[in-house]
Image (cartoon, coloured by chain):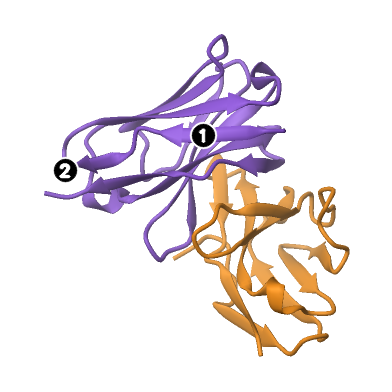
Chain colours: A purple, B orange
Amino acid sequence: QVQLVESGGGVVQPGRSLRLSCAASGFTFSGYGMHWVRQAPGKGLEWVAVISHDGTNTYYADSVKGRFTISRDNSMETLSLQMESLRVEDTALYYCARAVGLTFYFDSWGQGTLVTVSS
Amino acid sequence: QSVLTQPPSASGTPGQRVTISCSGSDSNIGTNSVNWFQQFPGTAPKLLVYSHDHRPSGVPDRFSGSKSGTSASLAISGLQSEDEADYYCASWDDSLNGWVFGGGTKVTVL
């Protein structure tokens, strides 16, 4: 079955960087696009970024554009999110999710990794 | 302020039908697939409906989706206590070149 396991979260000061990872298993990773979606404590879902199955296409939410970079390693079946210049408002639980087409739907989610940006 | 607009709450008694609305625009719901997710406290969201009105395998047929113009709806028929959760709509937005979510609707079973 599809399994997505996020890691890399933690507490970081404003302005610093952090790299999240998502290990995929149970499906042909290279055949699917992948998303990052976040949820601030007590708030709703906010889409962050998506990458195509081969990494050639990426899209970002305006709130993270220029600061976050989504990437993937199909040989390692791993999705990454490099986060730079972190802000307090980036504090959230970050989920990775499998994409069915880049614009159709996401059908499987991980359990999330918590990022806390605080001085 | 979310691009897609949902009511913050909805409620019903067991067995009732509850409907959640999701209002968007031509660039998102009007043109693209609408998806609905269910989320219980402390757990990851789960896909409930995709492409307006399709259910993944395992989702009870009590859940149904529909779309009309720039709005979509999720209906829960025969409401059960285990349906208490947060529900989110989502769609790709051609103007933003990204996905947009509704603010979420908390369903309470009275």
Crowding at label 2, few (<14), some or many (≥20) Cα neighbours within 10 Å?
Answer: some
**What's the residue at 66%, 68% (across, down)?**
B22
**What's the residue at 58%, 31% (across, down)?**
A34
> Up-down: is B35 above or below A19?
below
Chain letter of disc 2 in the image: A
At which x and y percent is residue B1? 44, 66
Residue assigned mark 1: A5
The amino acid type found where label 2 is placed reads Pro
For mark 1, give the secondary structure. strand
The amino acid type found where label 1 is placed reads Val
Q: Is residue B13 left or right of residue B60?
A: left
Q: Nearer the viewer, residue A56 or A72?
A: A72
> Up-down: is A34 above or below B7?
above
Residue assigned mark 2: A14
**What's the residue at 79%, 49% (across, down)?**
B51
Chain letter of disc 1 in the image: A
